[in-house]
Amino acid sequence: MINEQYKSMLGGKSIIRELSEYATARGEEIGYDNVFDYSLGNPSVPCADAYTQKMIALHQTMNPMELHGYSPSTTIPSVRQAVAEHLNRRFGMAYSMEHIFMTTGAAGALAHALRAVTCPGDVVLTFAPFFPEYVPYVQGAGATLSVVPANTSNFQINFDAFEQMLDEHVMAVLINTPNNPSGVVYSSQTLQRLADLLMQKQQEYGHDIFLISDEPYREILFDGKEAPYPSRFYDNTLSCYSFSKSLSLPGERIGYVAVNPRCTDADILVAMMAQISRGTGHNCPSSSIQLAVADVIDETSDLQVYETNMNLLYDALIDLGFEVVRPGGTFYIFPKALEADANAFCRKAQKYDLILVPSDNFGVPGYFRMAYCIDTEKVRRSIPVLRNFVETEYGG
Amino acid sequence: MINEQYKSMLGGKSIIRELSEYATARGEEIGYDNVFDYSLGNPSVPCADAYTQKMIALHQTMNPMELHGYSPSTTIPSVRQAVAEHLNRRFGMAYSMEHIFMTTGAAGALAHALRAVTCPGDVVLTFAPFFPEYVPYVQGAGATLSVVPANTSNFQINFDAFEQMLDEHVMAVLINTPNNPSGVVYSSQTLQRLADLLMQKQQEYGHDIFLISDEPYREILFDGKEAPYPSRFYDNTLSCYSFSKSLSLPGERIGYVAVNPRCTDADILVAMMAQISRGTGHNCPSSSIQLAVADVIDETSDLQVYETNMNLLYDALIDLGFEVVRPGGTFYIFPKALEADANAFCRKAQKYDLILVPSDNFGVPGYFRMAYCIDTEKVRRSIPVLRNFVETEYGG
């Protein structure tokens, strides 16, 4: 008999995907230029040219037996070394090759990190608003995801709620900074307080509590600010990364886990991840793509457009009277809806061909997400439409 | 606390990998040219030039946003279509795009097929000799692998033992033809008898029994013969494929599952696999590599060397008095050892710098595997060494 658990998942279509499909279909009716599609978090700038040139050069000049050969099960040593050196340079860490495990994007990174530091039945805590795919990621590892309610004043951490929920069953805490969907970057104060609380509770409960830090938006930062690196604040940290956004390579599935050198069992966690791969069919990301990203590790795509778009939208939203926290990075913004029911709000917006994602699946009712990884010209054209929608529907 | 299950796997190093590492270390001492390393099943011919040219062209000419964009969760439609048409052309099947799911190699294919058609606790049967990684693959899906003893006369199926073990708990049967490690190709008679028995037992037990057919060696065939396509014999078949061997791309991790159009739930199995991916972090193979293999779907590397090597080794082994079944394909041969303890036999061979893999992990005691994906010149030089080993140790 086929597996009913996976069969039952067929009904549960992601709201984001549903809205994106609606936008595409609507685009076929009225021209996609006339649909203001803020649904999907798909990079809107081309990949870094250095990556393209490196892939061409690898295929033109490298011995194909080496280029396309099996990775060692712990992934390619020279690539792991390049990632370690990059992180050390940038964040003053002390990684060596042994702490780096290359993965098929952040999804692969989280799948390995979660399986390595939790056992079936453990509780993993995350913070609203959160990326809805964390639910299947954590369930896939056999653990249970519990969501700490949001601190809606600034979308930093709601520490009162967190402390209450951080009981002895919690074996890992999953954060995402810069954050999808809020665009907020956790401050040094937030990360220090998080670390202090985790260290206190580790001692109290007599077991490790691992911090799994999902950082695919690490390079998309605004106002010239740097984002504090979570692993610097807390030793038991596994940093999960993807090149999908920084290099605009979402389909190429390349990322990594970086285990803090002072993490418990730091010397064996990557070897464990290689064992985890055997059961999931992961078995290393593509060799040629590992080699190419290692060579362009300090490059990014031209990410400036996201900041331009954010400023346009943030100013327009404020001007229209929305309550909204200014994003520090990513290509998302997360304003409060103009009525309590975010689904109703987004359905009304749809009449104006504004495709907004209601917030319920992100763990916060009454908000909506706009993914502004679209052309700036379209963002500009969407602003009068947004104004018309607000004034008509809410008597703005 | 870290996951003890994966930690405990750290001790269990694969004998193949251990021998391969020994061969490399020994090579550093005496020159790798002097080590007759038959340990590892790694393609020894370069990838098809058409693949290299296609990858270069894709990176030079295709819009990077399309080339590197997210795959749909069921993988890229044009690629699925190309695979369906290829299989239909070649095997007279009636696949459409909906039956094809692209994966990260055969490991990814098996991970998805096993999760789709078994539930935790189910029994999966396979046939000795078998690829030892089937153990973690099946365990990863939460099922239990049971191994039907070998038919050592010709390494087709031992039907008496199979029928006895095929009880109502068996939900899937896993075959591998052409076979690693025996090199044997299942005949039409074998596949027909297998299908007949499965159909009879399906009726008797009142539930489906799925056939998962692992076929990474499908293109490496000898004596001008074609291999019968298992899915033609039995409707409830999921065919798992990898381009690792046919195109010599083991590190690029690209393959697929093809669901027989007449399989139970054929219309939803691929959509289920897309759901399975969410929990394992698989999330589609690399977009550019999907597109490249679709374009060269009818090509292979120059695979002729494997047949040349097989003929040299087979004749030599027969001449030396070994009991051995002539391979019909792959790059493996699986002779009977000259003493009951294959480990002792292989340890003795090591003194002659002959690296042979004892058969115990393949589920058959007393045999050994030679992976002859090495230079023909080295195969030739190994024959007098093999003769010396046999004559000295076994008074041949």
Image (cartoon, coloured by chain):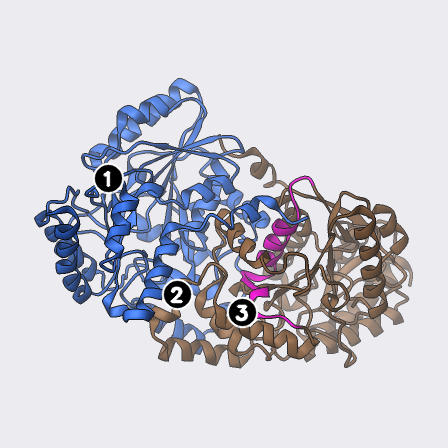
Chain colours: A brown, B blue
Question: Which label sits on residue B186?
Answer: 1
Cα–Cα span, label 1 and label 3: 42 Å
Q: Tag on residue A80?
A: 3
- In the rendered image, the residue lying farthest to the top is B204
> Given the image, on which type of amino acid does mark 2 rest?
Ala
Q: Magenta segment range?
A: A94-121
Q: Residue at x 79, y 44 (%)?
A: A168
What chain does mark 2 sit on?
A: B
Which residue is under mark 2? Answer: B292
**In the drawing, does residue B33 fall left or right of residue B85?**
left
At horizontal 87% and vertical 56% (from top left) the residue drawn is: A158
Assess whether mark 3 and mark 2 are in contact (beta carbons under 8 angstroms): no
Q: Is residue A56 left or right of residue B305?
A: right
Q: Secondary structure at mark 3?
A: helix
* Residue at 46% in and 47% down: B12
**Residue B277, position as x, y percentages in the image:** 54, 49
**Between marks 2 and 1, how big is the CA–CA gap?**
31 Å
Dot in front, 2 or 3: 3
Kindly report the distance in space between the C-alpha atoms of the residues bearing marks 2 and 3.
26 Å
Count of numbered marks = 3
Mark 3 nearby-residue class (10 Å; few <14, some 14–19, many ≥20): many
* Helix, strand or loop under label 2: helix
Marks 1 and 3: same chain?
Answer: no
Chain letter for mark 3, please: A
Q: Residues within 10 Å of mark 1 (few under 14, many from 20)?
A: many
Q: Indicate which label's residue lies in the foreground, 2 or 1.
A: 1
Vertical side of B303 occupied by A331: above or below? below
- Mark with earlier residue (2, 1): 1
In the rendered structure, find residue B259 and report the number of the disc placed on it: none
Amino acid beneath label 3? Arg
Query: Is A112 included in the stretch rendered in magenta?
Result: yes
Tag in front: 1 or 3: 3
